[in-house]
Amino acid sequence: MTSPSPPLGSEERPAPTGVPTPAARPAGHLAELPARAALVVVWSSGFLSGTLGLRYAAPYTFAALRFALAGLVLLAVAGIRRQRLPRGRRLLHLAVAGALVQAVQFSSIYAGMDLGVPSGLAALIIALYPLTASLLAVPLLHERVSANQLLGLVLGLGGVALAVAEGIELSLNCLPGLGFLALGLLGISAGTVYQKRFCGQMDPVSGNAVQLLAASLVVLVPALLAEGWDVHFTAAYWPVLLWSALVNSIIGVGLLYRLLQRHGTSQVSSLFQLVPMSTAGLGALLLGQRLGPLTLAGLVLATAGTLLTHHVRR
């Protein structure tokens, strides 16, 4: 005897493919905590490696060496894995995204710091990226930014301002450097939106190799014409260059793109509000810099803002 059929519409329906169930969401968030924490720490270390690297090389020369070394390493890995490099329109999109995220952002940061902008203030300006990227993502990617996310962004930026307010002395001599930092902020904001729209399925090896090599060609021109390839290869310089190329360019940007593939631009970019505080913490640990009360208060406020942003369901 067969059991009676359930009433129409009462049967269980499977969850749509690719949409996690509520029970699965917490596990997914916990599983990605290491990647998010690593992104913050690796990106923060880039300000320290940049400060050290500028002691031995001019800004665009340092950037060109960093991108070229990282790109060649990934190109070799792609060759070992027998991966075909992207072609045609995909190649063009990757090159544009790489020029924005890598070349424009990092060379502008180096140029600004070389012109006297303190690393803390440089980190603060780049930490505005969550706000600028979110504003670009609304009309271009049709992402929705909720009131809670906006509140989280405001809290995070307030925390950032507190954290870097201690010890910053700004003079008119820093104004050209601030202009370069603003250009760097535009680069990462426009670049990540472009990356998510046109390069969402990028292979992390071959795609990143293309982007890094394209970025190296972009900054090679000012490195040669404006700086005369100004670099001093010393024993102390090589560890800095290797760290910036292998860790900052390959691992850091790879983590950023991986998270962008899985989440909205607003959620991923809000992690950058923790970068100035993380930079301050690394500076205190590695360079003996003091963490004052405003820095500690800013850390708490920015952390609260980031947690609020990531708590929102997309």
Image: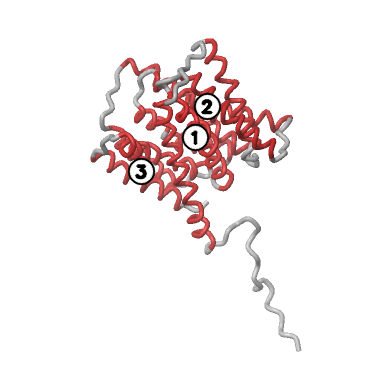
The residue at the point 64 percent across, 37 percent down is 77
Labelled pair 1, 2 in contact (Cβ < 8 Å): yes
Type of residue at label 2? Arg
Disc assigned to residue 19 = none
Q: Which residue is mark 1?
A: 248
The residue at the point 65 percent across, 65 percent down is 14
Q: Is residue 278 visible?
A: yes
Query: Residue 311: x, y in percent?
Result: 44, 53
Picture quarter with the N terminus: bottom right
Q: Which residue is mark 2?
A: 66
The extreme front residue here reads 235
The residue at the point 36 percent across, 46 percent down is 303
- For the residues labelled 1 and 3, the Cα–Cα distance comes to 23 Å
Answer with the quarter of the image where residue 13 lies: bottom right
Horizontally, is 54 left or right of 85 in the view? left
Disc assigned to residue 302 = 3
Query: Residue 137: x, y in percent?
Result: 54, 38
Q: Sequence-wise, which precedes: disc 1 or disc 2?
A: 2
